[in-house]
Image (tube, rainbow, N blue to C red):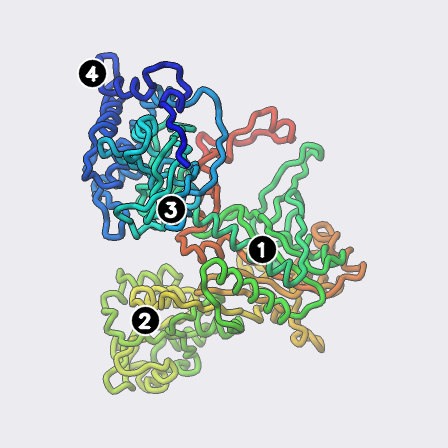
């Protein structure tokens, strides 16, 4: 049904016969006044030009750039991908420039708003209109994505969280609605009622491209009163590099309007829902919240502390994970617990870390390791199936920690490609090549990677200053030894000392590496940790630069049988590799076996070389827990002071239990194909742990500090 035409004044709630719009346009066209600052003046001109004289040949991208006041730069070209390509020279300005239009336009646009606040209801979302909706009268609410005024006919893409649809003024559109559409600017909020009709020129690149909405009534709900720091619709899809991240984080409300961010947040919610369904519907898990204000937890990072007002001098710690609470819930008989839990770790941030992050945290009683791994596989499969339409192959492969470290030098190997490491200690020991023989004598290792068709990597890349060499150095190695396998497949070619020194064992060495004629051998020699780290880096780098990583493959595997402890050289003591509540492998500690040498019943889940989760079966008896505390050098008093409540709980009949946690941010990042976990977190922090939107952490008053019994000892000139 057609709606009765409303005149513009009533749309805008104005009593004047001359509409505010007309007034603002007139103002924009008025001769240059000496009182007007130049920027404001040209902004007004710009707007007027845009409204009144937009070229019918202007691309929509150019039109949107123009709306943002970018018309003073050369108009962006449509790119092959259908996005817009901004000329390189203008990218910086495009991405970070603050555009002059709206800040100056606020005075005039304010007049276009109705006097009263309105809360209209819509009966249709923008991105969901399809051919079958033809003929319906619909009411949409959303933001103006782009607008094109073709002189009489005006097009505006109206966008909500579901996508956008083209709204058009056609010959039946009341003049007021046409004028209102013509006045629209990017990111204004509108309510449009109109008829769905088929487009004469469908656009098969957008889901709604077969239809458009012929406007009957257009209500401006809000305008943009400040300069837009970047274009929402004009930002090239998937090319966030073009928008500087600080600008995006500072203006996160706008950034989150961008379609790919909308998709990421919705994918996150969908993934969490899929995980909850498995946990609750299939496994009868119970969601329990655990405290945020708590005591220090044992994940090994630095705590965030919250000083207590009521207990002078005492601090809460924010949980690094709910580890101890979930174990106590098991003692409490909860049986199967989960939580979408926020965790806090005050670490120096690496690319994919955040000071606060979200885990899917799980604990269950009366199950063995296979029971937990099988649940873990159900969860991963559900997440990938619902979140990315990918069916992961089951059961997931398993690999021991020892094998992973030996073959890949890493406990999170990417097994989508070969380049495995060969251990050469027994081959090179006692040879004349002293670098290798000496490393073995000193208790170290010698390992090598065979790169097929080795001539793809030139010698200059392997020598000092070469990119492959640099990777080895960045991994901690002192250099990078290499050799090539000769055409006969049994001799080594390369540096004189290496080739001559290893000549007697060359055939055996080449066979051990699984290499053949023409392959390149990259060696690491020295202490095991350094060799593994350096060769792991080299392996990943070579795979990437030689295009050996197959896209679209999903390599998921469990790493099992981690050692219980690793040696912390700085503190000169053992520390738990997972956390000290992890149970030791029972056969390793049977018959007086040394717990310090034992393997743990711990497991990590690795997807394409990224750790996405991990857990363990837990110790559930006080006597065993005490042995672990003792092994990591925690005195009885310290153990009592820190974990007394858990130890006591263990004395009240603790059931056998185990669990795991998935890093949700990272999981969703992979499902979304995002480059950074910040892209799947609504309000993330920067690498220096700051929120650019709220400017947290911020100053607090002296009075607040006093309340918390904190003396102001240090006031840096400028926060870092
Ligand atoms: N609490 C452990 C972590 O945060 C996971 C677990 O053992 O369940 O890494």
Question: x%, y% of residue 371?
Answer: 64, 69
Residue 188, above or below 23: below
Q: Earlier in the sequence, mark 1 or mark 3?
A: 3
**Residue at label 1?**
360
> Which quarter of the rendering shows the N terminus?
top left
Is ligand 1 less than 8 Å from the beta carbon at label 1?
no
Q: Which residue is mark 4?
A: 32
Q: Is mark 2 within 8 Å of ligand 1?
A: no
Which residue ends up furthest to the right in the rendered image? 652
Look at the numbered disc 4 and give the secondary structure of its residue: loop
Residue under pointer 2: 481
Mark 1: give few (<14), some (14-19) or many (20+) Cα within 10 Å: some
User: Which residue is more in the foreground, 266 or 307?
Assistant: 266
2 or 1: mark nearer the eye:
1
**Viewer-nearest of discs 4 and 3:** 3
What is the number of callouts on the image?
A: 4
């Amino acid at each position: 049904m057609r709606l009765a035409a409303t005149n513009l004044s009533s749309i805008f709630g104005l009593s004047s016969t001359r509409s505010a719009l007309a007034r603002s346009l007139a103002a924009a066209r008025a001769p240059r006044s000496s009182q007007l600052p130049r920027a404001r003046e040209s902004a007004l001109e710009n707007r007027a030009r845009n409204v009144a004289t937009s070229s019918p040949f202007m691309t929509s991208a150019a039109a949107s750039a123009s709306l943002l006041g970018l018309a003073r730069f050369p108009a962006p070209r449509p790119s092959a991908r259908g996005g817009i390509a901004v000329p390189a020279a203008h990218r910086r300005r495009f991405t970070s420039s603050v555009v002059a239009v709206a800040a100056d336009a606020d005075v005039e646009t304010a007049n276009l708003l109705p006097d009263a606040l309105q809360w209209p209801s819509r009966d249709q979302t923008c991105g969901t209109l399809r051919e079958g909706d033809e003929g319906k009268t619909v009411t949409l609410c959303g933001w103006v994505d782009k607008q094109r005024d073709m002189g009489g006919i005006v097009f505006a893409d109206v966008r909500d969280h579901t996508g956008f649809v083209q709204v058009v003024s056609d010959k039946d559109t009341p003049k007021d609605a046409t004028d209102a559409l013509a006045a629209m600017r990017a990111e204004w909020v509108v309510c449009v009622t109109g008829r769905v009709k088929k487009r004469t020129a469908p656009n098969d690149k957008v889901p709604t491209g077969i239809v458009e909405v012929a406007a009957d009534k257009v209500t401006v709900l809000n305008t943009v009163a400040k300069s837009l720091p970047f274009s929402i619709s004009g930002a090239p899809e998937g090319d966030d590099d073009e928008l500087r991240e600080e600008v995006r984080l500072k203006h996160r409300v706008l950034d989150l309007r961008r379609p790919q961010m909308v998709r990421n947040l919705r994918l996150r919610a969908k993934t969490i829902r899929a995980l909850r369904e498995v946990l609750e519907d299939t496994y009868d898990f119970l969601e329990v919240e655990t405290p945020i204000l708590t005591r220090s937890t044992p994940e090994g990072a630095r705590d965030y502390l919250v000083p207590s007002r009521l207990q002078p001098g005492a601090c809460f710690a924010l949980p690094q994970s709910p580890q101890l609470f979930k174990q106590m819930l098991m003692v409490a008989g909860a049986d199967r617990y989960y939580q979408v839990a926020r965790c806090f770790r005050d670490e120096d941030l690496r690319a994919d870390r955040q000071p606060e992050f979200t885990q899917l945290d799980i604990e269950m009683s009366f199950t063995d390791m296979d029971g937990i791994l099988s649940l873990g596989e159900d969860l991963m499969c559900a997440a990938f199936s619902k979140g990315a339409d990918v069916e992961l192959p089951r059961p997931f492969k398993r690999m021991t920690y020892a094998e992973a470290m030996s073959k890949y030098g890493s406990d999170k190997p990417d097994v989508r490609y070969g380049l495995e490491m060969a251990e050469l200690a027994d081959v090179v020991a006692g040879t004349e090549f002293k670098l290798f023989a000496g490393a073995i004598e000193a208790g170290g290792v010698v390992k090598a990677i065979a790169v097929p068709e080795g001539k793809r990597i030139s010698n200059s890349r392997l020598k000092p200053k070469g990119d492959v060499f640099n990777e080895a150095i960045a991994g901690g190695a002192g250099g990078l030894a290499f050799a090539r396998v000769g055409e006969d497949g049994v001799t080594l070619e390369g540096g004189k000392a290496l080739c001559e020194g290893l000549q007697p064992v060359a055939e055996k060495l080449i066979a051990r590496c699984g290499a053949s004629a023409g392959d390149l051998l990259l060696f690491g020699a020295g202490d095991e940790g350094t060799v593994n780290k350096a060769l792991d880096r080299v392996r990943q780098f070579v795979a990437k630069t030689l295009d050996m990583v197959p896209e679209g493959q999903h390599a998921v595997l469990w790493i099992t049988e981690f050692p219980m402890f690793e040696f912390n050289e700085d503190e000169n003591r053992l520390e738990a590799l997972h956390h000290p509540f992890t149970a030791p492998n029972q056969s390793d500690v049977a018959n007086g076996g040394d717990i310090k040498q034992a393997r743990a019943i711990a497991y990590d889940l690795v997807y394409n070389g990224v750790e996405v989760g991990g857990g363990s079966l837990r110790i559930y008896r006080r006597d065993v827990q005490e042995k672990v505390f003792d092994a990591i050098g925690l005195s009885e008093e310290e153990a009592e002071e820190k974990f007394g409540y858990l130890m006591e709980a263990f004395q009240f009949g603790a059931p056998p239990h185990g669990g795991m946690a998935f890093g949700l941010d990272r999981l969703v990042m992979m499902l979304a194909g995002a480059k950074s976990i910040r892209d799947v977190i609504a309000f993330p922090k920067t690498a220096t742990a700051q929120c650019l939107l709220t400017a947290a952490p911020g100053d607090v008053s002296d009075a607040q500090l006093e309340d918390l019994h904190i003396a102001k000892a240090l006031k840096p000139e400028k926060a870092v």
